[in-house]
Image: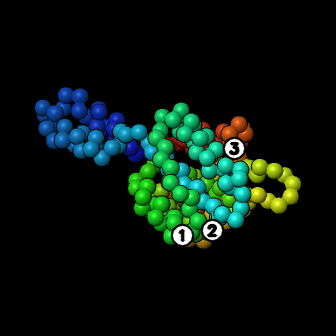
Amino acid sequence: MVWHSNLCVVSAHLSWNAERAFPYLEREAILLDSINLRSTPTVAYVPALLPSYEASQHRVVERSREILERRVAEAGARLITHATPVESARDAQRAYEELGKVDLVILQSATFAMGDVVLPFAEAGHAICLWAPSEPRRHGPIPLNGFVAMHLHTGVLRRANLADAPFVTWLFGDAGEPLFEGRLAAVLNAVR
């Protein structure tokens, strides 16, 4: 992100009146604009889950999308959501191909999810934010188990030597929870 803003500053600074002395600078400014260095950041929301858990009963994906729509818009970015939750590495690869270039992928473990679903995004060099929602109840069988999946995803990244490439962070919780709200604000601020 810093690289982008530095290029924009350099481009704006050099174009002040230098185009008469250096006509190629104007062409370079047009080139910079054409590759969208000044565009609105794009955040992709990709939910990952296994249908045997209770994501649908607790509306995890729908509530999460609503939260992100508000917070991402407030941060001045654009949200795109993958249409169907990811259940396998093949689904994740398809999601990566459909999303195209984005500035950040929020890969949510809406429930327990397979560890390899994180790899297509990391191998492509996307900035990744792993997110596990809070459990909707504290007694009985674990309804979501997303935290364990998020932990599994970080282990898969570490094993593939991708844990630091280029940017991996995490969120835990839901709207209104201080840990979640603070970390989400910091992540979205970093995207700008």
Q: What element carries label 1?
A: helix
User: Residue at the right extreme?
Assistant: 139
Q: Quadrant of the N terminus?
A: top left
Kindly identify the residue that appears in the image at 46 percent across and 64 percent down.
94
The tag earlier along the polypeptide, 3 or 2, is 2
Please give the label number shown on residue 89. 1
Q: Are marks 2 and 1 in contact (CB under 8 Å)?
A: yes
Horizontal side of residue 55 vs 143, given as left or right: left
Label 3 Cα crowd, 10 Å radius (few <14 / some 14-19 / many 20+): some
In this rendering, does residue 118 appear at all? no
Q: Are marks 3 and 2 in contact (CB under 8 Å)?
A: no
Total number of numbered labels? 3
The amino acid on which the numbered mark 1 sits, given as a three-letter code, is Ala
Toward the viewer: 5 or 49? 49
The tag earlier along the polypeptide, 3 or 1, is 1
Q: Distance between the residues labelled 3 and 1?
A: 26 Å
User: Residue at the top extreme?
Assistant: 17
Residue 155 vertical position relative to residue 176 in the rendered view, above or below? below
Q: In which quarter of the image is residue 34?
A: top left
Please give the label number shown on residue 114. 2
Q: Distance between the residues labelled 2 and 1?
A: 8 Å
The tag earlier along the polypeptide, 2 or 1, is 1
Toward the viewer: 143 or 187? 143
Q: How far apart are marks 3 and 2 (CA)?
A: 22 Å
Q: Do the residues labelled 3 and 1 touch (CB within 8 Å)?
A: no
Q: In the rendered image, which residue does mark 3 sit on?
A: 174
The amino acid on which the numbered mark 2 sits, given as a three-letter code, is Met
Q: Is mark 2 on a helix, strand or loop?
A: loop
Please give the label number shown on residue 138. none
Toward the viewer: 120 or 89? 89
Kindly identify the residue that appears in the image at 41 percent across and 39 percent down.
40
